[in-house]
Image (spheres, rainbow, N blue to C red):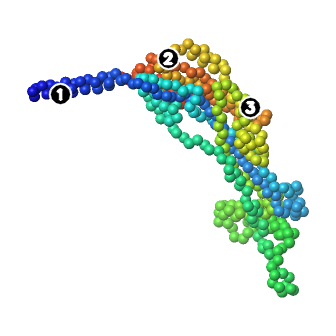
Amino acid sequence: MKYFIVLFCVMISFSAFAQRSDKKDNPVVSGSFVYSLPRTGIRVHVKATEEKFFHGPYFSYAKALLGIDNASSEDKVKWTIDDIKIKTFSEPDPGQIHLATGNFGVLISMTPSGIISGINSHSEIDVKNLPVTSFYGKQNTPEIPFTDLSLKSFMVKDDSTHHSGTIIVKPLQEKVKEAAQTITKLRKRRFKLFIGEEGKKLPDGDAYRVMSDQLEKLEKDYVALFIGKSFCKTFEYTFEYIPGNKSVSGDVIFRFSDSGGVLPSTDMSGKPVSIDVKKDIDLYSAQSNGTSNLPGGSNTIYYRLPGKAEVNLSLGIRLLATSSVEMAQFGTIAPVPEGLLNGDYSILFHPETGGIKTVLKNEK
């Protein structure tokens, strides 16, 4: 009886080991994995500067007291586009969703968004935060553009004959005259500093530069009371555009106005900045001829042969930027050769375009 029990346990153990060994050597996988091929989007980075000009409160006296002609009497706003960069990004193509079935499915690796990135290999994909464009809070207008109107008081005591002790505001003409006299004094002080007539010699060149810069700043502040001053601020924007699989022309990506700056495409107060994406037809035709007879089947894994495109951004007839880029959806779809899907090879794809990056034979 004891012999029979021991023999039975040995048979059960051998059977279990045989099943585990069989599963390890000959894995059988059912079901399928869903993956997508990428499509290419265009990301436009725009840098623009807003210049706000405030006319000087003493502008009408600029000619008489300082000899400055045509001092502006109006506030102005002027926007300029400083720089435009064209870059690309990838996202899953909703028109290219595929199934990897059976044993083929366990070989693929994907990006966090589901784009195929490798077969029988693993590739690290950086996940980056997408830039966000906000049109809120662009204003940078100072509440008081002219803070230093004079080194002297705005008030003066009443005439001493009245003995009232009343404090009165100086007339505008008197304040203008004081400002003009201060400008003259500052210029004389800088000249004396330059020729060394300010008494004791300065200890070093740095001390001279500090004093000279401060005098120059004071002079500019006072001159601004007559000719006005400008405040500049730079803003950055990002716009995204995803074309289909054909050339496009004249689509509005954003708008621009000299007074309003960079605006969304829906703001009709600005002029349209249009995008043209021209497909490289010659490359597409050559790819199509080369892939037309490639076999495919229900278990095939697909990849892309990315196409090329010329991208132009224009403001009216003015060309703002141009670039030649790889465009995944402008190319063709091809099957991975079935001989590379037996586990003996490692394949990496470019997740941005879906094209094959490397094919390596694994060492046994």
Position in image of residue 49 (x %, y %): 72, 48
Q: Which residue is mark 2?
A: 297
Q: Which residue is mark 1?
A: 9
Res 341 → quadrant: top left
> Alpha-carbon distance for marks 1 and 2?
47 Å
Badge 1 amino acid: Cys
> Alpha-carbon distance for marks 1 and 3?
79 Å
The residue depicted at 82 percent of the width and 58 percent of the height is: 55
The correct choice, above or below, for 94 with respect to 219 in the image is: above
Secondary structure under the numbered disc 2 in the rendered image: loop
Position in image of residue 353 (x %, y %): 57, 28
Res. 243 visible in picture: yes
Which label's residue is closer to the chain start, 1 or 3?
Answer: 1
> Alpha-carbon distance for marks 2 and 3?
40 Å
Secondary structure under the numbered disc 1 in the rendered image: helix
Position in image of residue 135 (x %, y %): 68, 47
Badge 3 amino acid: Gly
Which label's residue is closer to the chain start, 2 or 3?
Answer: 3
Q: Nearer the viewer, mark 2 or mark 3?
A: 2
Q: Which residue is mark 3?
A: 250
Which label's residue is closer to the chain start, 1 or 2?
Answer: 1
